[in-house]
């Protein structure tokens, strides 16, 4: 187990409901080890591994609380200043669009797999990804690969 995976496992033990920005459900679908820094990408991989661990029983599945604000992934982001995102106006728009298209509300809690399924079925499969994240600096990465939720 890497140090990052251990840190993410400890985070889950200390906080059994993981806060997650809705648009990060899309980011995680296409994440391929690229990001703002090696520390950020390592952390994001650790969160992805935690949320999608193979062989986890349905009863042991990790719940996420959908939040329009900094979340578990943001803790390692260079744009996070004491819990405030420097690009909050833009990314909050992404969050609201994901919630709207998935028929969800801020603060809603559900198993991560259920949320990932909604993102795939309501946004990614119908080809609505660009309507959510137009202007995202990582958009080109997502455009050329298949969603891991498919």
Image (tube, rainbow, N blue to C red):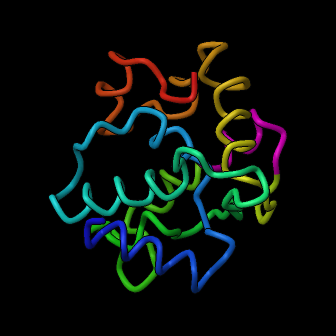
Most distant residue in the left direction: 38
Q: Residue at x 32, y 63 (%)?
A: 43
Q: Residue at x 71, y 23 (%)?
A: 121
Could you tell me residue 77's position as x and y percent?
A: 31, 66
Looking at the magenta stretch, what is its main secondary structure? helix
Q: Residue at x 32, y 70 (%)?
A: 76
Range shown magenta: 95-104
Q: Is residue 82 left or right of residue 2?
A: right
Is residue 91 rendered to the left or right of residue 87? Answer: right
- In which quadrant of the rendered view does residue 78 lie? bottom left
The residue located at (71%, 44%) in the rendering is: 115
98 vs 111, nearest the viewer: 111
Residue 94 appears in the picture as rendered: no
Report the number of discs: 0
Quarter location, residue 123:
top right
Tell me if I can see residue 122 in this picture.
yes
């Amino acid at each position: 187990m890497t140090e990052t995976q251990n840190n993410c496992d400890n985070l889950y033990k200390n906080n059994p409901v993981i806060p997650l920005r809705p648009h990060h459900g899309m980011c995680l679908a296409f994440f391929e080890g690229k990001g703002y820094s090696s520390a950020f990408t390592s952390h994001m991989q650790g969160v992805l591994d935690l949320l999608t661990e193979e062989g986890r029983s349905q009863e042991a599945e990790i719940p996420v609380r959908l939040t329009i604000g900094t979340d578990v992934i943001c803790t390692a982001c260079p744009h996070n200043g004491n819990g405030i995102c420097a690009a909050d106006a833009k990314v909050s728009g992404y969050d609201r669009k994901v919630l709207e298209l998935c028929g969800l509300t801020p603060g809603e809690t559900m198993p991560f797999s259920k949320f990932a399924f909604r993102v795939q079925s309501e946004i990614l499969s119908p080809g609505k990804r660009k309507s959510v994240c137009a202007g995202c600096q990582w958009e080109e990465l997502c455009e050329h690969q298949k969603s891991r939720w498919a």
